[in-house]
Amino acid sequence: MMLWIERALAMLLVGLVVVLTATTAVSWGGHGMSGLPLLIHMGASGALVFTLPVYAIIGLIGFSRRHLRASMYNIGFWGSVAFGLPTIATVFLCMLPIASTDTMHQLVSWHAWAGYALTIAAVVLVIGLLRRKVA
Ligand code: HEM
């Protein structure tokens, strides 16, 4: 049962990362995000802020049960947690009344790097899920 919940959360996480990454395409030309893509990015990010911690806790509970052959899944899991948290934290810090404008620009830049690292981790997670070697 827990395994299915973990897999469902992993797939939800991957789906959200796909949406979040796709909506950043508008910023690739050097322009910031705006309009509908930014709105969708905000909606999906709200869902990710809840999904990632829940998935991390459920995944940690199941971690001890996992077989060594599930290494691809494990890398995807730890990568998603390791890069997902700074992706969220950088935006959270921007919202606090402590960051100057320059610091905010720096944080948004780090947010983008951490976010794309999360995208790569999600790809690894998908490969791990497809291999279906989670014990
Ligand atoms: C796969 C995950 C994510 C990726 C790849 C990603 C990537 C990006 C990129 C490239 C930008 C544009 C930065 C710029 O204008 O230079 C951006 C903007 C933004 N993202 Fe994300 N992001 C992700 C997840 C999230 C999450 C989880 C949150 C909220 C907790 C979030 C909140 C924001 C906000 C508020 C902006 C607008 C910043 C601004 O232009 O002022 N993103 N994101």
Image (cartoon, rainbow, N blue to C red):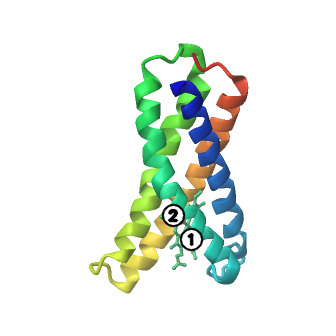
Q: Which amino acid lies under the numbered mark 1 shown in the image of this protein?
A: Met
Q: Quadrant of the N terminus?
A: top right
Q: How many marks?
A: 2
Secondary structure at numbered mark 2: helix
The percent position of residue 5, horizontal first and vertical second, equals 55, 33
**Residue 8 point in image, percent of width and height:** 61, 37
Q: For residue 42, which numbered disc appears in the image?
A: 1
Would residue 60 be found to the left or right of residue 8 on screen? left
Q: Is residue 89 above or below residue 102?
A: above
The quarter holding residue 135 reads top right
Q: Is residue 113 above or below residue 127?
A: below
Residue 4 visible, this angle: yes
Quadrant of ligand 1: it is bottom right
Q: Amino acid at mark 2?
A: Gly
Write the residue at 43% across / 73% down: 106
Q: Which residue is mark 2?
A: 46
Mark 2: is the Cβ under 8 angstroms from ligand 1?
yes
- CA gap, disc 1 to disc 2? 6 Å
Residue 100: image quadrant is bottom left
* Residue 83 seen: no
**Viewer-side residue, 8 vs 22:** 8
